[in-house]
Amino acid sequence: MTTTAGAPGTTSRRTNILLGGAAWVIGLLFVAPVLWMVLTSFHAETDAAQNPPAFFAPLSTDGYQAFFDAGPWPPLLNSLTASVVSTALCIALALPAAYALSIKPVEKWTDVMFFFLSTKMLPLVAAIMPLYLFASQLQVLDNIWFLTLLYTAMNLPIAVWMLRSFLAEVPVEMLEAAQIDGAGLLRTLTRIVAPVVMPGIAAASLICFIFSWNELLLARVLTSTVAQTAPVFLTGFVTSQGLFLAQVCAASFVVSLPVLIAGFAAQDKLVQGLSLGAVK
Amino acid sequence: MQRPKNWLPGLLMVLPSIILVGIFVYYLIAQNIWTSLNVATRRVVVGGKFEERSIHEGGYRNYTELLGSADYQHALWNLLVLTVVFVVGTMIMGLLWSILLEKGVRGEGVFRSIYLFPMAVSFIAAGVVWRWLLSPAKGEGAAIGLNQLFVKLGLDGLQSSWWSADSRWNMAAMALPAIWQLSGYIMALFLAGFRGIGEDQREAARIDGASEWQVYRHVLFPQLSPIALSALIIVGHMSMKMFDLIYAIAGPNSYTASVPATLMWTQLFAQRDPVAAAVNATIILVIVAVVVVPYLWYTNRTERERG
């Protein structure tokens, strides 16, 4: 196929349809695994186990019933606590740091950023053994607040990095103009900095929330019964009920739901934040 | 040199984050390296009596011992296959989609969220689906998941045992769910890159008689290379740290699907050998550092040059 610049009207239209088709096909392939999960979760166990899967069999919520009978609420609540509190802490710590690193540059701020980024090297697996010893010495094993603190530390470098990218967009001339006009710090922050930074805060919060909600490794090692989080509960459920596809799919769907909703609600900010975080 | 009055508040604003991250990361690394050099003995029963038997001699020998073991070499090989397929696959898919969307496909917002949403699903949840999709059973009636799909389509030859295959390349299949999860992210990065290039540059190239392919090849791609490098590093280091995915699909103690990260889990909880686990962790750390540090150093330098 040749796309010469001769007749832009017709050619580009045909190309567009072709590209659109390709995008739809790939898009469908992409949602298929999750679609399968949702469909299976709403079928009776016998229909879910059919080979081929009986997608058009009557719907049933038995899978969900079985999942909720297994007592998922305490783990879900634990996950919610750890994710929300650690996200809030993360932003509270990262915002001043990012502000200092972009608008009021600290001497050698690139070294500081380098320090934050260098922590990305540590594979979480490498942390579990010393963390476990540390936690048992301090007697904070199976403690949701300890996990919350760890999630804060885990997500802090990303939050600082993302917020700094957004804050770097604040026009310096406007800040100087505000200073000349005699605007106080509070006024400068609310009128000039906040509008630029709010999307950044939303994006960073979303990322922190998703990462904490989905975190498995630390939670699996450091919690057992009291502070168990949703992913840990889910792995246990998958292990014990693995043969019951509908139940397992229902469980997976329920546990994924909060992040899916959060992701859809703020997907534009997510894209913006993710790209900024890596491009800059 | 600035006056103290100017930098002190700034420093105070950064300090809490530095301390928290510093403790979390550097304390743990130090502890790890310290443990990895330890001598370890294990109490065994010999002829009805307890006897302390040395299992690690301590020092650098702990490293040569683990690196020389067949299990570890198998895990390292698996990691290499997984990383290469994962990185290449994600980059290609990400680039292709970003081109699709960049060309102005209608409903970009919908596609963007479709491509990005696997990233939000936790691997434990996605693992349920992928374990089913990649199940090794073959043949009419027995096959499920992807194999069954191939049978239905009359493509029996495409059936595979996926990651459970007894092959040196089995981990290539494990990269599929990983590609599924992260291509959207890479797509978003490239898309942002394309958007950052002004339309006038393309127009200029087209007026000069460049074909669409030449516009990409000579005008757009060269400007995307910094983003491509970032994407490469991000995906590469994610692959080396990957644990959840393999845990969810193959279980933490699978030999066929073992990589250093899952092997560490086995060493720690099944073999109860923290020294070997620490050696292993330190080796992973070094491998990741070899990839990430030059990149960080380079980024740091360019940032500084920019001011």
Image: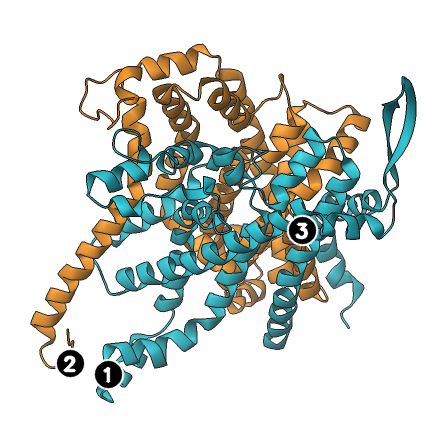
Chain colours: A orange, B cyan
The disc label shown at residue B282, or none: none
SS for callout 3:
helix
* A223 lies left or right of B247: right
Classed neighbour count for the residue bearing mark 3: other residues with Cα under 10 Å, few (<14), some (14–19), many (≥20):
many
Q: CA distance from mark 1 to mark 2?
A: 8 Å
Position above or below: B97 against A233? below
Do the residues marked 2 and 3 share a common chain? no
Which numbered disc flags the more N-terminal residue, 1 or 3?
1
Kindly identify which numbered label has been placed on residue B206.
1
Q: Dot 1: within a 10 Å radius of its alpha carbon, few (fewer than 14), some, or many (20 or more) residues? A: some
Residue A170 percent location from the top left of the image: 51, 62
- Residue furthest to the bottom in view is B208
Judge by depth and name the residue closer to the eye, B279 or B18.
Answer: B279
Residue at 67% in and 59% down? B289
Residue plotted at (73% across, 55% down):
B9
Can residue A169 be seen here? no
Q: Is residue B270 above or below residue A186?
A: above
Quadrant where the N terminus of chain A is found in the figure:
bottom left
Q: Quadrant of residue B196?
A: bottom left
Q: Which residue is mark 2?
A: A5
> Is residue B125 something one can see in this rendering?
yes
The amino acid marked with disc number 3 is Ile
Which SS class for mark 2? loop
In three-dimensional space, the C-alpha distance between marks 1 and 3, rounded to whole angstroms, equals: 48 Å
Q: Looking at the rendered structure, which numbered label has been put on residue B284?
A: 3
Label 1 close to label 2 by CB (< 8 Å): yes
Q: Is residue B95 above or below residue B76?
A: below
